[in-house]
Amino acid sequence: MNKEAEAMIEAIQQNDLGAAVKLFKQSVEQSVLQKNSADLAELAETMHALGFLSEAKEAFSALNVIAPHVQEWNIALAEIAIDEDDYDQALDILLTIDKESDVYPQALLTMADAYQVQGMYEVSEKKIFEAMELLPDEPILDYALAQLYHSIGEYKKAIPIYEELLYGNGEIASGTQLNFFLGDCHNAIGEFETALEYLEKIPADEHFPDSYFQLGFTYFQLKEYARAITIFKKLLEADSEYLSAYLYLANALEAEHELEEALAVMEQAIACNPYQHEFYTAAARLQLKMNKVEDAERNLREAATLEPDLSSIHLALGNLLLKQGRHEELIAYIADRAEQEDTDPQYNWLLATSYHALEDYDSAHASYTSAYPHFADNESFLLEYTAFLREEGDWDKLGEVIHQGLALFPGNPDLIQLHDDLHHFDQ
């Protein structure tokens, strides 16, 4: 690297971008004048690595002028085009590379990257296979194929390739990386014990945030909550903005009956990112378990503000109002949801219960009737509905609902008793 390039790097480090641009231009001009492709290549690669894509493109283009026979420059230019989301340009550049060139397999691999990021996974796979035909014993191609399968959820295809790379000859990726990928794949298909075998092979000093998360997640799935808590705490100490860890840590603490600490974790999560509605709903759920109803309601309303179209939040708030006996308020709230075209069938169940409590039996009957087709297989709903029908004396409908309910829940003692009572009544 020439002295102008070295001075440019110092200027970048000092955040003097104006000077850096001038020095970059001087460095390129000097290398072109001297036809020094080595210095220019080092400069181009440095600019690409630093994220200065326009300058990297200029340097690689200059290399094509002074050393047009070196086709690696076109691969680099294609990679820059991919970084800039200009996939057509990337593919046009790559198609100029001679199929007889030593770098053609690399060109195919870069094509695979371009197709992958566009969601054209079958074409990406095909390009990797073409490269494998040219270089059948090249581990980097196996690694690329495994990464493709991993990224698109084809975990069972990725696993044997990762295993071969882990236990075979040649180190394309570190053992830590491969153990992580294998753990992640096995977790994704529910093989948690196997996932744990790989994740626990990662040395403590080589863990990184994603590997810690996968390890904590695996412990959580295996109900080893104390271990999960330890790992998630380590993760958040290392990276307090790893947002997914907060929910799992709180859930693990809840499983260990540490509700106060679980709530404190969710409050930390909200402080870290006050715009994620899941944090408010998780905090509200814990607060309801702790009988902190006012706090729970406040958090649910905040969540509803963040995600006004998410029915689950409004239903949670509706259930809170129902449990507090705030029936008129609940009915008005659901009417507002209807105006917002939120027509989740659970609203009818909530309305039916509230109308029944308010002794508005006609409205309750209409709401139960609307809810029944959606909850005919819900044991709790059937018990509530049959109690209402019995109270109303609607024996024909009661008999129908009991008959269908017993077909689904033949051992339910309440339905059995209702059936017997109805049978005796008929006699």
Image (spheres, rainbow, N blue to C red):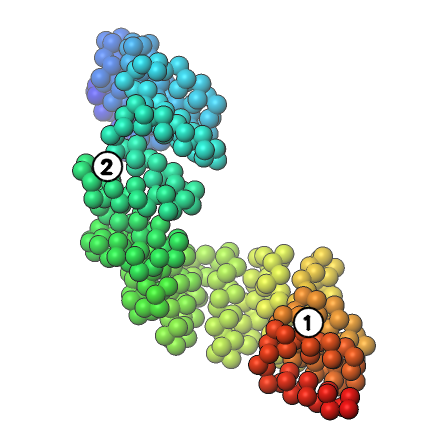
Instruction: Check the image and report above or below for 113 versus 371.
Output: above
Residue furthest out toward the right: 362
Tell me if I can see residue 304 in this picture.
yes
State the residue in front, 171 or 262.
171
Up/down of 209 relative to 84, above or below: below
Residue in view at x 23 percent, y 37 percent: 172
Number of dots carrying numbers? 2
- Crowding at dot 2, Cα within 10 Å, few <14 / some 14-19 / many 20+, comes out as some
- Which residue corresponds to the image point at 19% horizontal and 36% vertical from the top-left? 170
Counting from the top left corner in percent of width and height, residue 113 is at: 39, 31
x, y percentage for residue 284?
A: 51, 70
How many residues crowd around disc 1 within 10 Å: few (fewer than 14), some, or many (20 or more)?
A: many
Point out the image quarter for the C terminus.
Answer: bottom right
**Residue 37, relative to residue 343: is it above or below?**
above
Q: Nearer the viewer, residue 74 or 389?
A: 389
Q: Which residue is mark 2?
A: 172
Q: Quadrant of residue 371?
A: bottom right
Q: Which residue is disc 1 drawn over? A: 349
Q: Position of residue 394 (x, y in %)?
A: 79, 81
Which quarter of the figure is the N terminus placed in?
top left
Q: Is residue 30 visible?
A: no
| In this rendering, position of residue 27 left or right of residue 394 | left
- Helix, strand or loop at label 2? It is loop
- Specify the quadrant of the image occupied by residue 417: bottom right
Q: Amino acid at mark 1?
A: Trp
Q: Is residue 245 above or below residue 25?
A: below
Q: Which mark is residue 17?
A: none
Could you tell me if the residues under marks 1 and 2 are in contact, i.e. CB atoms within 8 Å? Answer: no
Disc 1 to disc 2, how far (Cα)? 58 Å
39 or 255: nearer the eye? 255
Residue occupying the far front of the picture: 427
